[in-house]
Image (spheres, rainbow, N blue to C red):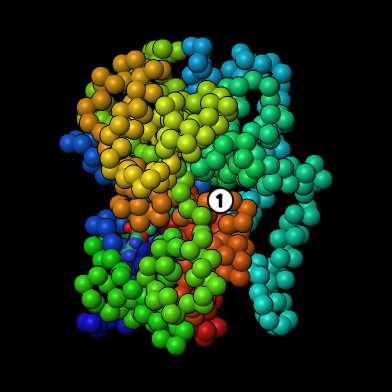
Amino acid sequence: MAGTGTHYDAVIIGGGHNGLVCAAYLAAAGLKVVVLERRGVVGGAAVTEEFYPGFRNSVASYTVSLLNPKIIRDLELAANGLRIVERKSSNFLPTADGRYLMLGNGKTHSEVAKFSPKDAARLDEYAASLNRVADVLRGLVLETPPNVVEGGWRQALPELLRAGRTGKMLAKLPMAARRDLLALFATSAGDFLDGWFESDPIKAIYGFDGIVGNYASPYTPGTAYVLLHHVFGEVNGKKGAWGHAIGGMGAITQAMAKAAANRGADIRVNTAVREVIVEKGTAVGVVTDTGEAIRAKAIVSNLNPKLLYRQLIDAAELPADFRARIGRWRCGSGTFRMNVALSELPRFSALPDPGEHLTAGIILAPTLSYMERAYFDARLHGWSKQPIVELVIPSTLDDSLAPPDRHVASLFCQHVAPHLADGESWDNHRETVADLMIDTVNTYAPNFKAAVLGRQIMSPLDLERTFGLIDGDIFHGALTLDQLFSARPMLGHGNYRGPLRALYMCGSGTHPGGGVTGAPGHNAAREIIADFRHKRLS
Ligand SMILES: Cc1cc2nc3c(=O)[nH]c(=O)nc-3n(C[C@H](O)[C@H](O)[C@H](O)COP(=O)(O)OP(=O)(O)OC[C@H]3O[C@@H](n4cnc5c(N)ncnc54)[C@H](O)[C@@H]3O)c2cc1C
């Protein structure tokens, strides 16, 4: 095993956006940090690449909202080249009967009233109550959850104080908001929305957020939380809005990498870690795939916890119960992702002329029951013949992605089985399912198929192979109540620390979970810096 000459305070395994954020904060605190990234480019699931000659797009993650404003400020991402623009219209949903619903840009009320004046009249109250609860979440995003500890009062006291602070925040909520909070944490998106609205299109647009990256029927309890998870963000100060990073999601992570490097972090690409070195219960270094050993006082993992603990650490080094439970960490968001190069913009039958609807998140799933069927079909057959597709055409907001008069589109397709029955490989079905996704768009926009010049396909297996996303899970683990907050990734380890001393987690498998938030990286860095300050690392 060859060793490097450099002595690092921290080695970060993985250069996803959270690894980069963590590196930037650690380096800013004066620590000597190195980030080791397996791929040839940093950014993890938030990267922009050329996928067809002359056409670039965000390969996986494709739209921005959850990126925390404090992190944007602290890392000076704007000065490092990041510019985020708003969509001109937030969502567009063509209906099965040839009509459409378009939200945003001051039109939401009149648009919803086309389907139900009663629903239009409830919109403000719905938004206000959702926002009250989303504000609670916003308040918790950059907090370390209270850790559930064993032992005496000495261990328990700091955690009780933390829990007390969280409780105080909740106690400030009026009773109606506490009831909403309970509903949003415990019920399904479908039941929640049925309680507010009567018309299908508005329920479908809002309900889509409940099944994004969440392999479940919109009527599965817990999906209301996922809906909430998708509204706690903001774009340029506008709460709940989604936008586009000019240059694609890679622009975010390139700016983060610059911020980390400017603060003194070393970043190495094409450097996969194959093993964490553990001595007497303490993580002391890593071994790369070329056999190089790099030692450090703190080892920080940006990976899905299941990948870290099941593949990079000798089983004998871990408590058996911990190892068994992490083996049961639920992953598999049921995601199929495509990028297409287009010779022209799609013309939707419901609204054929180009317009602001083409800057929106275009949801091709007209009702909640359609989404429920897609889920059941996928459970039975691997995918649905009527799948759920969100289409986003970022080149309508960003001319850096495609040649003049040409376009790129992201297809974010929900509800394919993470694993196919009888051991069937996704490699044998990816082209068929890709054709189906394009045909699905074509039923709403009949020029679409002929406009496709080239395509990139990411089945769940491709997502795992390319990005290390176990079972293709876009969030590093399901956002279910048993896998959130103090229990992310496991009760007793909700504070970015696992059972091995000096080994930290900073990825989406920790609080507050998936999405391009930067929050796990930020929070883990705070914990690691505190451990250095209190001389708990040497
Ligand atoms: C298809 C898709 C669509 C999405 N859409 C959105 C969206 O529109 N908006 C949004 O906010 N979120 C979206 N998400 C979720 C979001 O992108 C992720 O939650 C987030 O990017 C994860 O960031 P991370 O830094 O925690 O981990 P990752 O991005 O997964 O980074 C982990 C890094 O570790 C590297 N790695 C793995 N193994 C090793 C090893 N052994 N050695 C060294 N390096 C290793 C990987 O290559 C990767 O770079 C999407 C995700 C996917 C996959």
Query: The residue under label 1 is which amino acid type?
Result: Leu
* Closest to the observer, 104 or 510: 510
Q: Residue at x 45, y 83 (%)?
A: 282
Q: Which residue is mark 1?
A: 479
Identity of the residue furthest to the left in this view: 53
Q: Is residue 481 above or below residue 500?
A: above
Q: Quadrant of the C terminus?
A: bottom left
Regarding residue 110, the answer to whether it shows in the image is no
Res 108 quadrant in image: top right
Identity of the residue furthest to the right in this view: 175
Q: Residue at x 71, y 38 (%)?
A: 129
- Left/right placement of residue 135 relative to residue 12 reads right
Res 226 quadrant in image: top right
Q: Residue at x 27, y 34 (%)?
A: 431
Picture coordinates of residue 233 (x, y %)? 55, 45
* Closest to the observer, 117 or 436: 436
Regarding residue 146, the answer to whether it shows in the image is yes
Picture coordinates of residue 416 (x, y %)? 43, 38
Picture coordinates of residue 338 (x, y %)? 33, 36
Q: Residue at x 39, y 17 (%)?
A: 443
Picture coordinates of residue 192 (x, y %)? 68, 35
Q: Report helix, strand or loop for mark 1.
A: loop
Q: Is residue 301 above or below residue 70?
A: below
- Left/right placement of residue 266 relative to residue 350 reads left
Q: Quadrant of the N terminus?
A: bottom left
Instruction: Check disc 1: other Cα within 10 Å, few if <14, some if 14-19, many if 20+.
Output: many
- Left/right placement of residue 419 relative to residue 124 reads left
Identity of the residue furthest to the front in this view: 422
